[in-house]
Amino acid sequence: MLLLAAGLSLLSCKSNPTGSAERLPAPILLPNPADTSLVEVGIDAVDFGDYIRLDWQAGDKQTPSEYNIYRKKDGDEQSFTLLGAVGGNQTSIIDSSGIAVGTRYYYYITAVDDDGLESEPSDTLDYQLIAKADVLNNTLAVQPVFSWRVEAVPQFYVLKLVEAETDRKIWVAQIQSSFTTDEQVQFNKDGRATVDSLKKNFPYKWRVDIIGPSRNSGSESAWKRFSLQ
C-alpha cells in the first residue's frame, strides 16, 4: 500500500501518444466494504489518520506500467485533477493529500500502458470522512465496559475487538447510539462475541467506527490496546 501526499506524483505521468495501440481495459475501483467487515477492502476511512483508502483490481491479467489516480471534491468548479501515479503492481493507495473532514471526495483511476496510453476511466466512487471517536477507555474486568466520546452524534457505531497480536475476531457489534457525545457499552451486550469473557494477561485491542449519516461516509478511531491484570 502506498501513501499519496499533497502534490506528490509517485511515478512520472506520460502523455498519451497519437495513434497508439489498443487501450488497456479500465481498472475496477472497489466499493465501500460492509461496516462490520474485519478485512476491509474498498474505498473507506482508515484508523491511523484522516485519510481515504482506495483499492482496485486490474481490468485483465496484463500488468499496466502504472495507474493514474484522479480526484475532485464537492464544490470544485473544475473537473477532476491528477492526484498522482503508482506502479502497475500496486492495487491500493492511501490518500493523505489535504483531506478535510466533512468534505466529500470523488475518485477514478486509469491504467497506463508502456507507451503512456491511458485506459478508459474506472467507475467514479466517493467518500466523506467524519470526525473520529476519541477518548477511548475500558474497564479491566473480564467483561469490560467500553467508553468513548464523539463530536457529532451518529445513529450507529461499530465496535471491533480483536486479539492484539493476531487480529483474531473476539467481538464485532453494531451499536445503536444513545444520542449523547459520551457513549459506553458492556462487552458482549448482543451475545455475539466468540468468548464469554476475556482472559487475563492477554493482549487485546479495540476501536470504534462511526457509520456516517449518508452513503459512503464514516470514520475509524485509532486502536486502543489493553490487557487484564
Image (spheres, rainbow, N blue to C red):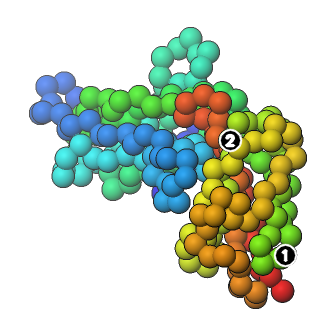
What secondary structure is found at the residue carrying circle 1?
A: loop
Instruction: Estimate the spatial distance between the alpha carbons at disc 1 and disc 2, rounded to whole Å.
Output: 25 Å
Question: Where does the C terminus fall, quadrant-wise?
Answer: bottom right
Residue plotted at (35% across, 30% down): 123
Camera-nearest residue between 53 and 140: 140
Give the residue pinned by disc 1.
Answer: 140
Residue at the spot x=64%, y=40% of the render? Answer: 211
Between 126 and 117, the residue placed more toward the observer is 126
Task: Locate residue 155: give its quadrant.
Answer: top right
- Which residue type does callout 1 highlight? Leu
Near mark 1 (Cα within 10 A), the count class, few <14, some 14-19 or many ≥20, is: some
On screen, 56 above or below 74?
Answer: below
Which quadrant holds residue 180? top right
Residue type pointed to by label 2: Phe
Q: Residue at x 71, y 79 (%)?
A: 198
Question: Could you tell whether 78 is left or right of 87 in the image?
Answer: right
Residue 153 is situated, as x and y percent measured from the top left of the image, at 79, 36
Residue at the image position 73 percent from the left and 36 percent from the top? 154
Q: Is residue 67 visible from the viewing direction of this image?
A: yes
Q: Position of residue 184 (x, y in %)?
A: 82, 54
Helix, strand or loop status at disc 2: strand
From the viewer's perspective, is residue 18 above or below residue 130?
Answer: above
Name the residue beneath numbered marker 2. Answer: 156
